[in-house]
Amino acid sequence: MYIFNKTRLKLTAWYLLIIMLISISFSVVIYKGLESEVERFARIHRMRIERQVLLMPPPLSPADLDLIKESKQRIILILAVINGVIFVISGALGYVLAGKTLKPIQEMVDEQNRFISDASHELRTPLTSLKTAMEVNLRDKNLTLLNAKKLISESVNEVDKLQLFSEELLQLSQYQTPNGTIPFEVISVTEAIKKAVHKMLPVAKQKQIEIKEKVGEYEIKGSAFGITDVFVILLDNAIKYSPRESTITVETRKTGNSVFISVTDEGMGIEAKDLPHIFDRFYRADYARSRTGTGGYGLGLSIAKKIVDAHHGSIHVESKRNTGSVFTVSLPLISFS
Ligand code: ADP
């Protein structure tokens, strides 16, 4: 906070310096111009008198000289007042402008700080429980080989999850910057969906879940990797939160200049109170937290939303507890106009 106030004042000072330099230079030019005008006026005035009286030009009287001096002083005073007013107005405007310039940077830093504190909070819990389990077993003098193997296998599972978490964090940071850092090109949405389905089929098979595809051919401008990631996340969730032997359907339809892709599952659904938060980072509904084995870190949907936002699209969910969920992604199609 302190650094921003200091920078804001520094920026204001720079704005002021530039404006005042311009204003004072103009004032000097104006003063020089007016000074020569006053002297020219005095000369002409003298010549007129000379012509009228047909005499040699009288020298300027002390009263005339005083008048010229007074005029010059008045010009200086007026210019000083104008510069003073410019100083005050540009100081205030500069301060407001500096604040506006710094606002997005301040918001970005705040967001990053929140992100770091959330991420370290999420990391602390599994690391502590991993450490505690190891310490307890190390202290156990009667630890059998079987129990030691069990502990190692549980620890490997935990480490796998942490590895996935770090990958997700990386993925999220990739899309964190405005407009993302990934180059956009013309891509086939259909291919991206098919790739995602292909990747998730083995996971679905483990639960005997069928994935039905009703997908048309559509092209958009975007990142093929990014769009595939979105559907991997949605399918992964659909599988995680669905019972065995259920069906997941991926469907596309075109409305206006957008393609709508929906992923429908027959899973446990989402409670109304959770719906507004599921796209937030690290948010998991209570049932998702309490179920062992489903354990993500609540990053999937926030990554999906970041990617869709970067493609100028939107993502929505409709869900009913114990009936199923429909996640719909809409993406703008390439317009040929
Ligand atoms: P997670 O890694 O926990 O799955 P996500 O960000 O992908 O994190 O999802 C956030 C939460 O939204 C999940 O914890 C879960 O509560 C809920 N959720 C997401 N997809 C589904 C779904 N298809 N069915 C039911 N709940 C879901």
Image (cartoon, rainbow, N blue to C red):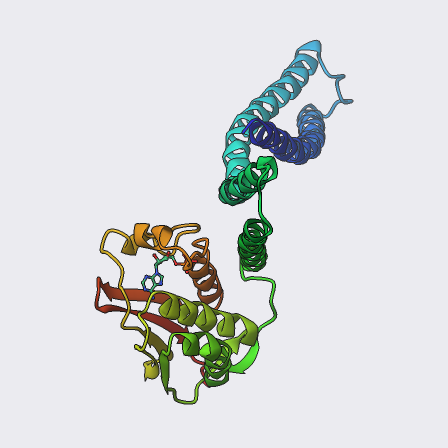
In the image, residue 134 sits, relative to residue 323, either above or below, namely above
Q: Whole-percent x and y of residue 266? A: 27, 72
Residue at image coords 51%, 81%: 195
Residue extending farthest top: 62
Can you tell which quarter of the image residue 241 is in?
A: bottom left
Q: Residue furthest bottom?
A: 217
Q: Residue at x 44, y 51 (%)?
A: 281
Residue at 61% from the left image edge and 32% from the top image edge = 7
Tell how many labels: 0
Pick whichever, 6 or 154, lies toward us. 154
**Where is residue 25 drawn, in percent x and y?**
70, 33
Q: Nearer the viewer, residue 304 or 212?
A: 212
Does residue 121 lie above or below 194 as drawn?
above
Q: Quadrant of ligand 1?
A: bottom left
Instruction: Identify the residue at image location x=73%, y=16%.
Output: 60
Q: Quadrant of the C terminus?
A: bottom left
Task: Name the quadrant containing residue 211.
Answer: bottom left
Vertical side of 322 occupied by 123: above or below: above
Quadrant that contains the N terminus: top right
Q: Is residue 284 visible?
A: no
Query: In the rendered image, is residue 196 in sight?
Result: yes
**Left or right: residue 244 compared with residue 226:** left
Residue 47 vs 310, above or below: the answer is above
Q: Where residue 207 sits: x, y (%)? A: 38, 74
Judge left or right: residue 210 versus residue 90: left
User: Residue 284, percent across and down?
Assistant: 37, 52
